[in-house]
Amino acid sequence: MSPSQQKLAEKLTILNDRGVGMLTRLYNIKKACGDPKAKPSYLIDKNLESAVKFIVRKFPAVETRNNNQQLAQLQKEKSEILKNLALYYFTFVDVMEFKVKYYKCLSCSTVNFDLTKNYLDLIITYTTLMILLSRIEERKAIIGLYNYAHEMTHGASDREYPRLGQMIVDYENPLKKMMEEFVPHSKVNALISLQMVYPRRNLSADQWRNAQLLSLISAPSTMLNPAQSDTMPCEYLSLDAMEKWIIFGFILCHGILNSDATALNLWKLALQSSSCLALFRDEVFHIHKAAEDLFVNIRGYNKRINDIRECKEAAVSHAGSMHRERRKFLRSALKELATVLSDQPGLLGPKALFVFMALSFARDEIIWLLRHADNMPKKSADDFIDKHIAELIFYMEELRAHVRKYGPVMQRYYVQYLSGFDAVVLNELVQNLSVCPEDESIIMSSFVNTMTSLSAYTSVSKASLGLADHRELGKMMNTIIFHTKMVDSLVEMLVETSDLSIFCFYSRAFEKMFQQCLELPSQSRYSIAFPLLCTHFMSCTHELCPEERHHIGDRSLSLCNMFLDEMAKQARNLITDICTEQCTLSDQLLPKHCAKTISQAVNKKSKKQTGKKGEPEREKPGVESMRKNRLVVTNLDKLHTALSELCFSINYVPNMVVWEHTFTPREYLTSHLEIRFTKSIVGMTMYNQATQEIAKPSELLTSVRAYMTVLQSIENYVQIDITRVFNNVLLQQTQHLDSHGEPTITSLYTNWYLETLLRQVSNGHIAYFPAMKAFVNLPTENELTFNAEEYSDISEMRALSELLGPYGMKFLSESLMWHISSQVAELKKLVVENVEVLTQMRTSFDKPDQMAALFKRLSSVDSVLKRMTIIGVILSFRSLAQEALRDVLSYHIPFLVSSIEDFKDHIPRETDMKVAMNVYELSSAAGLPCEIDPALVVALSSQKSGKNPEEEYKIACLLMVFVAVSLPTLASNVMSQYICFCLGHCNNIHCLAKAINQIAAALFTIHKGSIEDRLKEFLALASSSLLKIGQETDKTTTRNRESVYLLLDMIVQESPFLTMDLLESCFPYVLLRNAYHAVYKQSVTSSA
């Protein structure tokens, strides 16, 4: 055996791997030089422009002495050029070294599959390398710049430069040069050996269909039989690789095309299948033009040129449709295969060959489409747009997943196969060999580990044991190699047969395919295939070019993130559309819509004709569910179908790992649902800041519940925790701002009730009626744009409590208390203005004349009463809100509420006030009424006036005095009339009862005074002042005297600290009884 043939397998393997590394580096150099941002700065530097042009013009000659002016700038940059262009320069040197090693291996001939494949791959790798090198337009500038810098630095050219420069010049037209070099190596046995394999692989879809290719169920009786072939590795051999071997091989050895019909037929068949070949990644080689340009200058090649033109016409006319039909067949074939294997994964053992054949066939068709879609002729563009490509990729991914998941099943099967069958047959074949020299017998003894070495050893010429003479042994070796791969190299087999990392370099086409997939509802279920493809990208990197790992890794992450985000957005939009439809249907069931139906029913009974003739009858809710025909498809049906398809894709894998990053598709959907649900809730309030319009709480609650019902149904499609979405979103809505700093429904409704409803109450347009437990519009000149009762009755307040929850209602209460504290601060200022008069009045309540004189000295009496009334209105609204909250919580958590209520009711009187306040705070949060309002105490105690505690206490006492002595002035107000059926006054002075009790309780809790004593003092002053107006004769002053008398009764009824006995001692009950009689009598008279 000659030295060149020793360790041939190892040499071919190493050279091929190194060749791919060289290609990767050259590819990155080409892309960098083609990108203005990544291009070496010396090539675009204006100062170096003349030097670069000179170097390129003189290349490869080196002239430094006579051109100092042009190269002067180069002298300044020489060290930086050497440093920054070294990687580029030595890459070209490595290519030159590769060329030398390549020609040393070229003289070997083989008959074994692995050796033949490696041999042909090496030829293609070298050819591709030289073509790619010739496509780097800046190669002369880079090499020349580096060498000139080297000479200026070291005084001599780089030692590799002469050979490298000559190679660059020689390979200006790489194929032409290689055709000349290949003449001594024109044995084409390896190419001719494809005459059986390539035509069998290059069949039409109809031929595949007739042969029932890849079908496991076409012959049920043989389903468990292992899939066998005499040429096992050829069955899943890449069609793309074979076409490269044939086209480049016969271009380099073109002489045989004129002498061998088999070679010519192979070449023509390959030319008819494609318009271009993939050189490396997205670099393509236009077959027909290049071949024609090469042959046109060779004498006697007119026939070949005509063949090329005919094949080009055939490729343009028929290749697109042929490959389209193949993809159509493969979609159904892979679907069947994946379905059967998912049901019976044990078949992966005997039918592993089918799986890898299917993956290889599909991969070849996808790659063919990808490269031709970018280089397609305009005539037949439709053949190069496949909207169903996602389905084919999806079933490829499903088969890959089966192999990864059930890999141990396959390994166990083939371990038993190797020991129980292959070893026995091989042993028999070896025993029957006429000659088996010592070297071969040693290798045979450990055949599993050294099968490729043995193949190489027995394949080379002059081997004493030749595989050409022992074909059965060769077939057996191929079979055993395949079986050992099933045990040791499943992952590598998946990469070899189904790697689609090429999509990394066709980003635009990749994204376009994804968009087409989402646009077609029937294909959206396969959209997960695109993020899954991103897991392939890192397999295209090479250890000889580590710097591109980060670039490709980042691209895979960004694409995967973009795809999953788009899928989640699409699903979110569909869910939003369904929610909108459901909210519309739910809105039809609102009570307000039944008014027309009731009106029609009443009119029908009374036989009144209302409405115009011919007016269409309003459809009743539920009509949409009545179907007369199953074929009728509503918009809602379409949305649900599209959503179920897309959710299948999102739910397909729990997570995927891309470049050591884990992606969870469901989390993307959850995140988008949270954001959209948040926006939708706020949007459904329909708050208009300009007109101060807002949706009724009950209507919003109905819409939110309809929305939530739809979201809950998503759990039927995707395994996500929708409760988590509700908790995250609805809890954020109970706060002032959400996690993005946007206003929530809590802030919107709080602002609306404070700034719109309660402000109109203060302006006298709305009154609070205790009998109705609601705020009601009063008849005024300027009608309000909203009906207060529709926003404040008990049902609306309960709906508000449901929406805002305890946290939101607490925020509402705190906002109300802040307004009260500002009013109390103003009241204190008024007290300070009248402090001397009030101090005297406090001790002179039993001296009517002195009181009358002092009262005339008081200022801002009306302001005090107005501010106290506003406080009372706010507290009345808060009591409505608290009562609604208690009702809602009693429904949801009755046991907890009853426990809190029991705890509150049984606080001992002697309990420390701090402890009691904690209990009151808990009770208030549950909506329970308390003797002392903890929120009001907190709000008032936060006021800091800088006065000492005694003065503050005195001002608090005098404030109660001020209110008490001011009450009689209310009798002269026309609006102070008591309305019996409403149990209140039109000007809301009945709210004073709540204000007086709550403010007194809060202030004297803060200042640690006796609430009961201070309220007794208030009652004494108030009754004395009111008794005085009983003696008044002026009708204007006593206009509504009886209505004002009732305030005393209301104050006592409202207070937990005062009793009717105490009132009797200050104010005769007979006066109250007469007052009630008078106001009821007046009410009857006015209504009559």
Image (spheres, rainbow, N blue to C red):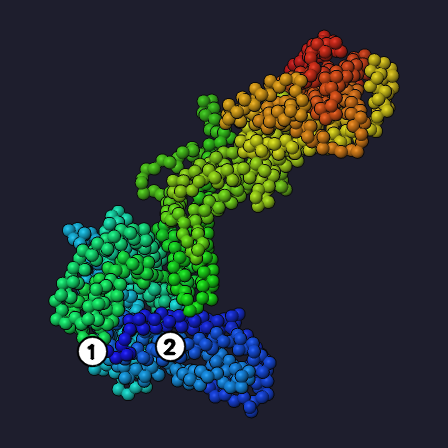
What amino acid is at disc 2? Phe
What residue sits 44% from the left and 55% below the top?
660
In-front residue for pair 996/609: 996
Secondary structure of the residue carrying numbered label 1:
loop
What residue sits 78% from the left and 25% below the top?
953
- Give the labeled residue for mark 2: 98
What amino acid is at disc 1? Lys
Left or right: residue 946 compared with residue 695: right
What residue sits 72% from the left and 26% below the top?
1006
For label 1, the crowd category at 10 Å Cα-Cα, with few meaning under 14, some 14 to 19 and many 20 or more, is few
Left or right: residue 101 compared with residue 471: right
- Mark 1 or mark 2: which comes first in sequence? 2
Secondary structure of the residue carrying numbered label 2:
helix
In which quadrant is the N terminus drawn? Answer: bottom left
- Give the labeled residue for mark 1: 462
Give how far across and how far down residue 908 sits, in percent: 63, 17
Q: Are marks 1 and 2 in contact (CB under 8 Å)?
A: no
In-front residue for pair 607/66: 66
Marker disc for residue 31: none
What residue sits 27% from the left and 60% below the top?
485
Left or right: residue 66 compared with residue 504: right
Asked if residue 248 is positioned above or below residue 872 in the image, the reply reads: below
The answer to whether residue 232 is visible is no
Give how far across and how far down residue 871 sits, in percent: 70, 27
